[in-house]
């Protein structure tokens, strides 16, 4: 009889002992209790805002979590609470976010394809440069970029917000896509190469169709981050009819926010709806996207 | 003879050229958008902002060279700069470790093979996804207001809370709490890291009868150090760059008494409030140096505490 099987038996015995099983059970229950308590504590603020937005105006701060009477009044007041309706802000945000998604998908995947699959002089140098920009605080490019876009006459247009995406400035997504492309078997594009396919066809017909998960992840993150972005619209968009939702909310807090909290909360809730919808339908993709960034460095 | 040598040489040259072109052209064609962006929107601006940091520049008249004046002023004659450094460092030093500790704690709890893991994971991740939004900053301002939800909770306990956001002693802490609230994305990365630890290490430890505490310190944490390292760097850089919550909560002022004057907020005020583009460029460059030093320091010390398999 070997030592190993003895040891094995020993663990089986300890695992079977009722006292230990009971203890494990109790730990399990305690862990669930802790996690549920933490979930409630974390989500409470969100639920509170949601509920406040549906309460009648005089109960916004006093009401219970489940409103005694439901009212859409805050939504109507908030929607037209500013000179320009929130419909315009939502439309502007949508246009900017969708354009940024298109830009990132094209430009980042092209760069990633070059880094992951094509051989050319200086590839590792440029790749190292790309990795360095991952950590770069954007403040250091901010002012010259502003000067440049101002010279081009782009201030007060959406171009400063969207054009950079067509030049793959979001190194994070280039990096994410390189990681994914490297996982696609090389035999596939080598076979295509043998058949005389050009690099362009391999990119378009082999790589992209096999990369839908990472493209979707990049698209969703780009949409959410652009939708949420406050800083770039703040400096580049000065006219209210060009405002994004985030700028609209900020103006709301500064001007009428003090008097119409209901409208402010209602519009805040609405501004989170697109993000929440993506979260509901694609959370697995988002979570995997986040998880892979920490791996395989 | 000479002519002949010349032509063969040219033939070789053009052969070399066309081969080099054929070998490199597809790569550079695909890289072109990124390359233009990198040179025109990253490297060019970095160099330009270094130049601007040695000038006075108000956007309207040409930059005027002032030497190191901007940098000298930062350290000798600008109380607001010092205040913003203090606020930002305080924020980084408290929010990052607390957030990571929270993320790791919850990840460990979830990693015990809990039922409902995907649900918990999703719920805890949600704030990370929403957190950067203006809407959440607005919500936070309300939660910690004098008549806010937090004080409504404290009232039955007999505590009359102050207006947390307008009290300089607490205002920064509300932002730290907001940052900790978004512990979801490092938590997900921790979970992925925990799953990569070979199970047989734990089996060996349990055979030796090691306590849970010992297993955590001797196996889990050392094996997880690459992920801790990654999370710490990413979160620290994010914390240095944090802008929106402070801007919304203080209505762009950084008040009360500069207690929420984040570095980025001060930079914004200088650049787009007062149009002191030269001075703001110096601030930006100092931030770059700060982040670069921190990153270099982390990488240099990492070999003493980060455990790599290979």
Image (spheres, rainbow, N blue to C red):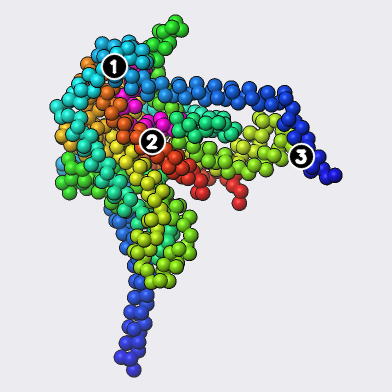
Q: Name the residue under label 2.
A: A279
Q: Give the side of residue B211 with respect to residue B88, left or right.
A: right
Estimate the spatial distance between the alpha carbons at disc 2 and disc 3, rounded to whole Å: 44 Å
Labels 2 and 3: the sequence-earlier one: 3
**Residue named by callout 1:** A70
**B129 is within the stretch colored magenta:** yes
Q: What element carries label 1?
A: loop
Q: Where is residue A202 in the image (x, y as percent from the top left)?
A: 38, 63
Residue A162 left/right relative to A44: left
Name the residue at 59% across, 47% down.
B308
Q: Residue A242 carries which label?
A: none
Which residue is pictured at 63% across the width and 33% down the height? B216
Q: Is mark 2 on a helix, strand or loop?
A: helix
Which of disc 3 and disc 1 is earlier in sequence? 3
Image side of residue B147 versus residue A39, left or right: left
Q: Nearer the viewer, mark 2 or mark 1?
A: 1
Q: Is there any visible trace of residue A296 in the rendered image? A: yes
x, y percent for residue A184:
46, 57
Circle 2 residues within 10 Å: few <14, some 14–19, many ≥20: many
The magenta span reads B124-147
Query: Disc 2 to disc 1, how far (Cα)?
Result: 26 Å
Q: Tag 2, which chain?
A: A
Q: Name, please, the residue furthest toward the top.
A: B158
Give the labeled residue for mark 3: A8
Q: Residue B119 in magenta?
A: no
For mark 1, name the chain. Answer: A
Q: Position of residue A169 (x, y in %)?
A: 33, 49
Q: Distance between the residues labelled 1 and 3?
A: 62 Å
Q: Work out whether B134 lies above or below A209.
A: above
């Amino acid at each position: 009889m070997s030592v190993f099987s003895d040891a094995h038996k020993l663990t089986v015995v300890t695992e079977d002992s009722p006292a230990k099983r009971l203890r494990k059970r109790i730990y399990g229950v305690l862990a669930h209790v802790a996690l549920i308590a933490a979930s409630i504590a974390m989500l409470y603020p969100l639920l509170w805002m949601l509920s406040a937005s549906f309460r009648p105006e005089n109960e916004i701060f006093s009401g219970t979590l489940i409103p005694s009477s439901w009212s859409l009044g805050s939504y109507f007041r908030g929607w037209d609470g500013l000179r320009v309706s929130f419909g315009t802000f939502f439309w502007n945000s949508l246009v900017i976010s969708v354009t940024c998604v298109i830009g990132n998908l094209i430009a980042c995947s092209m760069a990633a394809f070059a880094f992951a699959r094509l051989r050319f002089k200086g590839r590792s140098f440029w790749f190292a440069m790309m990795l360095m920009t991952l950590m770069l605080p954007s403040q250091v490019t901010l002012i010259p970029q502003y000067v440049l876009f101002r010279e081009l006459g782009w201030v007060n247009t959406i171009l400063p917000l969207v054009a950079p995406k067509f030049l793959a400035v979001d190194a994070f997504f280039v990096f994410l896509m390189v990681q994914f492309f490297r996982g696609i078997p090389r035999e596939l594009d080598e076979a295509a190469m043998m058949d005389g396919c050009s690099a362009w066809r391999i990119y378009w017909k082999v790589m992209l169709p096999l990369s839908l998960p990472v493209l979707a992840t990049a698209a969703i993150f780009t949409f959410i981050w652009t939708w949420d972005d406050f800083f770039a619209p703040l400096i580049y968009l000065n006219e209210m009819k060009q405002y994004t939702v985030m700028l609209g909310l900020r103006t709301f807090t500064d001007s009428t926010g003090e008097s119409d909290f209901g409208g402010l909360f209602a519009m805040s809730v609405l501004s989170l709806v697109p993000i929440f919808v993506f979260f509901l339908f694609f959370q697995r993709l988002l979570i995997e996207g986040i998880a892979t960034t920490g791996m395989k460095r | 003879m000479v002519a002949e040598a010349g032509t063969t040489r040219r033939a070789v040259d053009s052969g070399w050229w066309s081969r080099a072109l054929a070998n490199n052209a597809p790569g550079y064609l695909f890289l072109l958008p990124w390359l233009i962006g990198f040179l025109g929107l990253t490297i060019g601006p970095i160099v330009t902002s270094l130049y601007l940091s040695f000038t006075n520049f108000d956007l309207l008249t040409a930059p005027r060279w002032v030497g190191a004046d901007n940098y000298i002023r930062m350290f000798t004659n600008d109380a607001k700069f010092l205040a913003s450094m203090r606020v930002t460092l305080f924020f980084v030093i408290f929010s990052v470790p607390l957030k990571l500790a929270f993320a790791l704690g919850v990840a460990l709890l979830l990693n015990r093979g809990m039922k409902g893991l995907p649900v918990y994971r999703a719920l805890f991740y949600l704030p990370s996804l929403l957190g950067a939004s203006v809407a959440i900053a607005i919500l936070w301002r309300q939660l910690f207001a004098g008549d806010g939800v937090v004080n409504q909770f404290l009232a039955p306990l007999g505590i009359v809370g102050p207006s947390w956001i307008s009290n300089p002693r607490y205002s920064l802490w509300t932002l730290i709490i907001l940052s900790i609230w978004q512990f979801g994305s490092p938590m997900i990365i921790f979970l992925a890291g925990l799953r990569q630890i070979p199970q047989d290490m734990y089996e060996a430890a349990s055979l030796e009868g090691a306590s849970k505490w010992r297993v955590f310190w001797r196996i889990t944490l050392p094996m997880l150090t690459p992920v801790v390292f990654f999370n710490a760097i990413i979160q620290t850089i994010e914390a240095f760059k944090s802008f929106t919550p402070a801007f919304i909560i203080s209505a762009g002022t950084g008040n009360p008494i500069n207690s929420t004057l984040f570095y980025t907020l001060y930079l914004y005020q200088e650049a787009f409030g007062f149009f002191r583009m030269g001075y703001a460029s110096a601030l930006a460059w100092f931030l770059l140096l700060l982040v670069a030093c921190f990153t270099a320091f982390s990488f240099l010390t990492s070999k003493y505490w980060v455990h790599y398999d290979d």
